[in-house]
């Protein structure tokens, strides 16, 4: 097609992508072209703004390393991650769900741990935390043999892959539910933390006059054949940013009941105050599939200095 004016550009691209053989890919590309071209027309994107947008996309790729994923961080900061999650869970967005964001810090090689183990693998100050987890299907029956990845930030607000001072795999573990669908573990109470702001995501947050904090939470990923893999985060209600998460991840179903105890705990080494959390998860039938890990390695002192 010989293009004679701006309106014909969209027609030409739509005609080209309409020849895509895969039906779902064709549907996605046709919608993408219509919406993307419509966006450009609606705001009358200038040539200078187009070059800036290309620069931002390139910068996100350049900022992404084995220990940091800027693209995932940007998707969360625009609410896209949360929207995709809520659209695809809870009866396709119709009901409440325990599903939540994977986030940019999950590692797929987390160590297998026994029920009752501690996630603390290097000295980590902070209030002790005991978490008891139960997993059920939609009819209230226990789900045995589920593999559950757990990970969270330190009380200083850093995941171990961000912090060379923490031992490899600190505050991470993988558990298997017992015949009653249960397991428990010990750790320290996580803290809220700032997302990195030294890249394109930071520029977005500053431009929109938002803070860059996530409220304190525990990550869970539950995998069992026959069930849809459940990725969840359980938030602490006492966090000052519980209602203004920079990644738009907090839903009412995910605010946990973290109970404070001022007396010494029954677990060794837990002086008051410490916290407990009893968390029940309900699995939906579906495909058991592990996501691609957004990070693959731990940051070193050198990589931290280069950020």
Image (cartoon, rainbow, N blue to C red):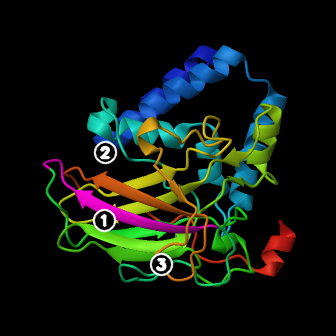
Q: Secondary structure at mark 2?
A: loop
Residue 129 in the image: state x and y as whole percent: 53, 67
Q: Nearer the viewer, mark 3 or mark 2?
A: 3
Q: Which residues are magenta?
A: 127-139
Residue marked by disc 1:
223
Q: Nearer the viewer, mark 2 or mark 1?
A: 1
Q: Residue at x 50, y 21 (%)?
A: 11
Residue marked by disc 3:
267
Please tell me which residue lies in front, 212 or 157.
157
Q: Residue at x 55, y 72 (%)?
A: 264
Residue 253 in the image: state x and y as whole percent: 41, 40
Q: Is residue 19 visible?
A: no
Q: Is residue 185 above or below residue 100?
A: below
Residue 203 in the image: state x and y as whole percent: 81, 42
Q: Is residue 45 above or below residue 66?
A: above
The circle drawn on residue 22 is: 2
Q: Nearer the viewer, mark 3 or mark 1?
A: 3
Q: Secondary structure at mark 1?
A: strand
Q: Secondary structure at mark 3?
A: loop
Q: Quadrant of residue 123?
A: bottom right
């Amino acid at each position: 097609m010989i293009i004679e004016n701006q309106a014909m550009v969209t027609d030409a691209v739509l005609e080209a992508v309409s020849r895509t053989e895969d039906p779902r890919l064709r549907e996605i590309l046709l919608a993408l072209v219509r919406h993307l071209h419509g966006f450009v027309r609606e705001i009358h994107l200038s040539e200078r703004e187009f070059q800036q947008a290309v620069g931002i996309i390139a910068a996100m790729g350049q900022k992404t390393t084995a220990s940091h994923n800027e693209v995932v961080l940007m998707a969360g900061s625009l609410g896209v991650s949360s929207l995709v999650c809520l659209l695809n869970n809870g009866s396709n967005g119709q009901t409440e769900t325990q599903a939540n964001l994977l986030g940019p810090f999950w590692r797929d090689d987390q160590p297998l741990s026994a029920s009752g183990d501690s996630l603390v693998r290097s000295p980590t100050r902070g209030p002790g935390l005991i978490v008891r987890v139960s997993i059920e299907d939609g009819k209230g029956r226990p789900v045995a043999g589920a593999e559950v990845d757990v990970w969270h930030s330190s009380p200083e607000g850093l995941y171990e892959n961000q912090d060379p001072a923490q031992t490899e795999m600190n505050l991470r573990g993988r558990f298997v539910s017992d015949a009653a669908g249960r397991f428990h573990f010990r750790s320290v109470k996580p803290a809220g933390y700032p997302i990195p702001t030294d890249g394109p995501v930071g520029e977005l947050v500053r431009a929109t006059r938002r803070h860059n904090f996530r409220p304190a939470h525990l990550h869970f990923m539950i995998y069992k054949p026959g069930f849809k893999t459940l990725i969840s985060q359980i938030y602490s209600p006492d966090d000052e940013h519980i209602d203004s998460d920079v990644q738009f991840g907090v839903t009412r179903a995910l605010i946990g009941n973290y109970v404070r105890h001022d007396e010494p705990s029954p677990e060794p080494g837990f002086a008051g105050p410490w916290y407990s959390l009893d968390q029940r998860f309900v699995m939906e039938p579906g495909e058991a599939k592990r996501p691609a890990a957004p990070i693959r390695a731990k940051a070193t002192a050198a990589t931290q200095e280069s950020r």
